[in-house]
Amino acid sequence: MAVITYREALGQALAEEMERDPDVFLMGEEVGVYNGAYKVSKGLLDRFGEERVVDTPITELGFAGLGVGAAMTGLRPVIEFMTWNFSMLAMDQIWNSAAKLLSMSAGQLKVPVTFRGPDGAALQLGAQHSQALEAIYAHFPGIKIVVPGTPADAKGLLKAAIRDDDPVCVFEGEMLYNLKGEVPEDPDFIVPLGVAEVKRRGSDVSIITHGKMIHAALQAAAKLEKDGIDVEVLDLRSLRPLDTDAILATVAKTNRVVLVEEGWPYGGITATVAAIIQEEAFDHLDAPILRVTQADVPMPYAKGLERAVKPGVEHILDKVNRVLYR
Amino acid sequence: MATKVYMEALSPTMEEGRLVSWLKNEGDEVKEGDVLAEVETDKATMELVARGSGLLRKRMIGDGDTANVGTVIAVIAGADEDVSSFGGGDAGATAEAPKAEASPAPASASPEARKADAPAADEKPAEAPAAQAAPAAEAQASTEASADSGQQNGAQAGGGRVKASPLARRLAAESGVEIGGVQGSGPGGRIVKRDVEQAAQSGAQRPAAAEAPQPAQAAAAASSGTAYHDLALSPMRKTIAKRLVQSIGPVPHFFLTVEIDMGEAARLRARLNERFKDQGVKVSPNDLIVKAVAAALRRHPWVNASWTGDSVRFYDQVHIGVAVAVDEGLITPVIRDADRKGVAEIATEIRELAGRAREKKLKPDEYTGSTFSISNLGMFGIEEFTAVINPPEAAILAVGAIAEKVVVENGDMAIRQRMRVTLSCDHRVIDGATGAQFLQTLKAFLEDPMLMIA
């Protein structure tokens, strides 16, 4: 397997799916001539032409709506948001159109659109451009949500998203674009939606997380290993559908759980997972479920404050030690 | 801020407390942890401790008054705080549950326990604990529920509530470990998985517990290689265990044995059987014993009685429970008013009830309400044994086999039909002499049955 970056893996996924299916096209701000704000779509305009790699004005609501309409008529649009922070301008198209048309048309209207773009805080981009927004999208039934944390998952999940007949939002990690990893070259390699993956096997405590935070979890696990603590890290990968079986399996195995997410605690993904665990696996718990999240404040710009607010390895270590009663 | 003083659950089973005496007067300055009052629980006199500091502004009940657990009985507040909203001794204004884990208060022993033990009847729903709301910048701290509240040891954190993780409770139930007896090693003494596992290894198992559901006939081989099989408990087996443990535990037994000559009784029985032959009635020795016991009880009311906790209850009627072995257990059908029935009637009734007992077709009122019981293992050749009292009765008679024995009479040896009976007595009701006198009467009735009508 070739070792490539997360960015290149996404580009491969787009190219392979556009190659495979002429109905697939890419649309968004700067995706064509500029090769993408983050260079994910590098080379695609040259390869597939202006009809299938479409630069748009700065009009999120408009081009998201074009995507939904194109999908309703049978195409498979991939709509790139320059970042998910800008997608909020297109909420109505995503939440009220894409998510609901299948149900409201009694199954007559499929909307096989893929929305994608970078998510989460980078460094000192301020409160408005430093948000992990997957939780609010996951709130809506009717959309599928994936959050790849590795290059291989990025490629496999994006390809699965494009092939899926439902609207899928792909939350890419802005800080992961340069991450390198082995990525399968098989053009039919996909990562199925709704399947979590144990990224590290362990028996003493489970960290359940997704996206960028799997790397902080793995670092924490490596540190704890030196203390003889055997940490299991479960990467949810898909938030909708959620792999409840995998969650319950790791809880049954270790009996102690720390939930980690980059976003805020209130109504977060971790809040939902915690609720599921206590509803379905109460008798497997040997300690309260603890969470690591971003602090419940808008992201500060100041460097030191930003560091304090973001969830990190130290926070995870602290919570793991607490659920282990150490 | 005002601190309400609640009548706290100072014993695991306490539902109300009597305030023996206030140790602080209204207006006294109190500090958190100060003893405010002495409270008599259902078990002992305990100290009620202040959960906050300030002035003891208001006492709502007086010395000697009783209040339900959860009732506000006083208010601690600053000198200038308005406490007029606190009524006097209003039980309805009770349980605004003390803020649960919100305040890092000293290990003032789980307010949850207080909440849990508080009588639910006349309370308004407890206000939600004001915990985790704080939108603090330190979100990492925002999601803790209970951890690290205090470092007390012992899982009986307060009010007798056992703190254990859900997993620990399940494991304990599965492995037969009594969770209350396990020492917790988690925060605040919480019992966790490792504690239960340790307890299970160290053999803190309770004896074949009643509740633990076991698969019927689950055959298995222990690690040592000894073969065994488990038989699931029938409801009857469970009830026997529960009842008898109830008995031998709190009931102080003592035992009296006497040997009775059954020669006359045997002759009487033969005559009776001859007489009732055409009616199909067959009187057994046991039927005669039932009759004699009933007659003797009429003369010894202390043996036909119960301990109720604060009185001895004498029964006006004599209802004899006769233990009958059935598949997988025993049951005691009741011969009501046995002292007023003839032997033939008793014989017929026992036969009929025992038959239906073995078919498990007794109605509840046919096996409840006995005032004295008889257990007869004579047919098994048991010469003598002791029986366990069937609460709330005060005594039970264990009847052994009738056997020919050589006895000395007037200096000569003679062969006689002898039987040993043992009376188990609840010493709270029956003293040695009382029991002995009853046995004397019984012996006289059986050795000379005519005395029963004398």
Image (cartoon, coloured by chain):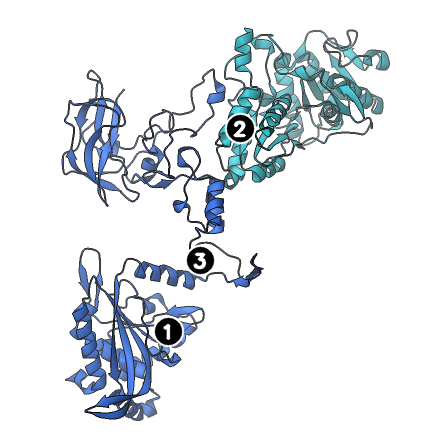
Chain colours: A cyan, B blue
| Residue at horizontal 31 percent and vertical 81 percent from the top | B286
Q: Please, which chain is the residue tagged with disc 2 on?
A: A
Mark 1 or mark 3: whose residue is earlier in sequence: 3
For this rendering, which residue is in front, A6 or A233? A233
Residue type at the position of mark 2: Val
Residue type at the position of mark 3: Ala
For this rendering, which residue is in front, A325 or B77? A325
| Residue at horizontal 40 percent and vertical 25 percent from the top | B131
- Label 3 sits on residue: B208
* Badge 3 density bin: few <14, some 14–19, many ≥20, Cα 10 Å: few
Are the numbered discs 3 and 2 placed on the same chain, yes or no?
no
Q: Left or right: B172 with respect to B319? A: right
Marks 2 and 1 sit apart, C-alpha to C-alpha, by 60 Å
Q: Secondary structure at mark 1?
A: strand
Of circles 2 and 1, the one toward us is 2
- Label 1 sits on residue: B324
Q: Position of residue A82 (x, y in %)?
A: 69, 11
Q: Please, which chain is the residue tagged with disc 1 on?
A: B
Q: Position of residue B115 (x, y in %)?
A: 33, 36
- Label 2 sits on residue: A320
Q: Left or right: B418 with respect to A107? A: left
